[in-house]
Amino acid sequence: MYPQSKVLIIAGSDSGGGAGIQADIKTVTLLGSYAMTAVTAVTAQNTMGVKKITPIPKKNVQKQITMILDDIGADAVKIGMLHNVNIIKCVHHILKKYNLKNIVVDPVMVAKGGARLINNNSITYLKKLLLPLAKLITPNIPEAEVLSGCSISNKEDMIQAAKKILNIGPKNVLLKGGHLRSKMIFDILATKKEIKVFPKRKIRTKNTHGTGCTLSSALATCLSQKKSILKSCEISLKYVDRAITYAPGYGKGFGPLNHLVLFNSKNTNV
């Protein structure tokens, strides 16, 4: 089997392997594409939480990205934790210079255990510089509240927040509903033309570490394979749902997903 496309991942490293670059590489590979990475920060973490974050110098991040793009190229870009303003500005400059397409931004702001991963100044530059370049942005409810300025407690609130985020500049918004406190949760896709609601029954589990990273990487992979936004969302949400369902149960805290679930991306009913 040959890779169907090439995906550049710009994100932080997770020493526990459940999220960040590690989850991204597993996801891209399992969905049939070739993963390349630019590490923006190294974290010391496990399922219990993040204990230390060490940013990678801007010039190092810049060189990682340009070395890849000058040689191999990329059909899509997944952007995760950028951590500070200098890195955000650096990534923005490169994205513009190389005119990269299929950019998926996961606005990583808070770790599952509650640790803040980005400051307010960085959020301002993320909204100003990166969101307008994004083909798709994938906030969860707490992140969407920060980006939209809205309080979110139900499906209707999610739709309104997604519309507000859409007005910031991204071409599409997939607002994840996992934080809703109800038996049924909803993921909301907002495009310039329509609102699409993906309902599902909530899986009662603590093994959800890396769901955001996995979803955004799956979406970037699908888009790199020339699938539509709607089809990419259907495939990626199904993949994450199965990865949660069959999680291995590692660790004492929020455990990782099972990225090895048998899955055929051409058939979302698998």
Image (tube, rainbow, N blue to C red):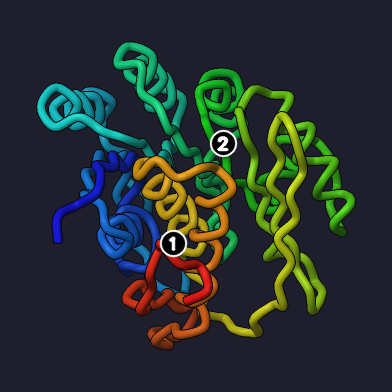
Residue 181 appears in the rendering: yes
* 130 w.r.t. 25: above or below: above
Looking at marks 1 and 2 on the same chain, the residue that comes earlier in the sequence is marked by 1
Position of the N terminus, as image quadrant, is: bottom left
- Label 1 sits on a secondary structure element that is strand
Q: Residue sitting at 40 percent across and 63 percent down?
A: 265
Question: From the viewer's perspective, is 227 left or right of 176?
Answer: left
Question: From the viewer's perspective, is 12 left or right of 128?
Answer: left
Q: Residue sitting at 52 percent across and 83 percent down?
A: 245
Q: Residue sitting at 10 percent across and 27 percent down?
A: 71
Question: From the viewer's perspective, is 58 left or right of 20?
Answer: left
Residue lying farthest to the left in this orientation: 71
The residue where tag 2 is placed is: 119
- Label 2 sits on a secondary structure element that is loop
Q: Choose top left, top right, bottom left or bottom right for residue 113.
A: bottom right
The residue where tag 1 is placed is: 50
Callout 2, which amino acid?
Asn
- x and y percent of residue 11 in the render? 36, 44
- x and y percent of residue 154 in the render? 87, 59
Residue 43 appears in the rendering: no
Disc 1 versus disc 2: distance between alpha carbons? Answer: 16 Å
The residue lying toward the viewer, choosing from 269 and 250, is 269
